[in-house]
Image (cartoon, rainbow, N blue to C red):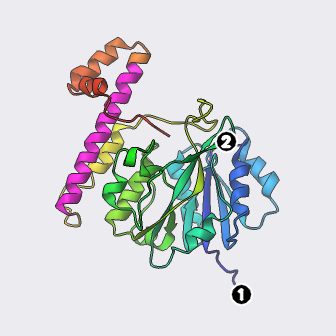
Amino acid sequence: MAPKSPYVSIIIPTFNARDFVSRAIQSALDQTFDDLEIIVVDDGSSDGSGPFVRQKFGNESRLKLLELRSNFGPSFARNVGIDAATGQWVAVLDADDFWRSNRLEKLSLQMADRDFIFDNLVGYDFASGLETGEIFPVFPGAELTLPQLLSPVPDSAPYNYGYLKPMMRLGFLNQHQLRYDVRIRTGEDRLLFTHALLSGAKTATVSEALYVYSTPVGRLSGRASAANRTEPPHKQLAEAYLSLVRGDNNLLTSSQKLLIRRFSKTLEAEWLQAHLIAHSKNREYLAFARTVAQNPRALTLLLMQRINLEYR
């Protein structure tokens, strides 16, 4: 008789996270809902993360380790994990984050007739080792909509809803051929969620903060997370959103197209602003002038400080 497939596949992509990945893995193993498998994808680490996980968790039957020969980026590593998953649901857990022990149990109550289940995040100051409160004091009720997802800074929260780490029905992902865009290293989560909502994903929300998220900069310590490899948004991300509305796409409504076009412009402005700030800090005055000359609105955007520059 073939072994029974787990209900949930937990994907943990890791890159040079030897010092803290065990906490993420242990938080998955300690779930009160235990019908699960854990897939750790070592994305070409050079710090011995793969051998460390194998040595520490080698006797754990629910865990499998996949080791990539090179560093391909978080989107690629997550896709490898999703492709290897055998559960009905998949959930991504970043190596520097961890879960409340009852997260899967709480989210499983919302699984009926849903495709994506979003819960709140609680901030974690990696340097001090202290939690810093809920990321979203006001959380969407019942479901997450496209306008909410594409809101730059919802309800004055420090982050946008693209930082969420939902449970995702694997059958829905496969049916609509949805995976993370391997070209994107910043904003890849929200792009995937956008594709899912446009594909008709039914969502549910849980306002309780069950996912503990290591913020890029600790709220208490003011120090960067040990795993923070944040990159400024790339212009390619704006292009990825624009590609959704180009051509004869009859699946999108006019309001959806307008929303995505506006959001793409926001991303492009964010990209320009990040480059101007970097040029200024590095005293790259010629590059600064060239960017302004090529993008006349760039200096205005910088001076007005319209965009909230929080990256992961």
- Residue nearer the viewer, 275 or 48: 275
Q: Nearer the viewer, mark 1 or mark 2?
A: 2
Q: Residue drawn 47% across and 35% down?
A: 231
The answer to whether 3 appears left or right of 205 in the picture is: right
The answer to whether 204 appears left or right of 15 in the picture is: left
For mark 1, give the secondary structure: loop
Query: Which quadrant would residue 138 be assigned to in this image?
Result: bottom left
- Residue nearer the viewer, 140 or 92: 140
Image location (x, y in percent) of residue 283 = 41, 12
Q: Residue drawn 39% across and 71% down?
A: 202
Query: Which quadrant would residue 222 be assigned to in this image?
Result: top right
Residue beneath label 1, please?
1
Q: Is residue 93 visible?
A: no
Query: Which quadrant would residue 234 be assigned to in this image?
Result: top left
Amino acid bearing label 1: Met
Which disc number belongs to residue 130? 2
Image location (x, y in percent) of residue 257 = 21, 56
The answer to whether 64 appears left or right of 89 in the picture is: right
**Mark 1: few/some/many CA within 10 Å (<14, 14-19, 20+):** few
Image location (x, y in percent) of residue 2 = 69, 83
Q: Can residue 152 be seen in this view?
A: yes
Q: Residue drawn 65% across and 58% down?
A: 100
Task: Find the distance from the CA under tag 1 to the CA under tag 2.
Answer: 47 Å
| Numbered range of the magenta stretch | 253-279
* 281 to 44, vertically: above or below: above
Q: In which quarter of the image is the N terminus?
A: bottom right
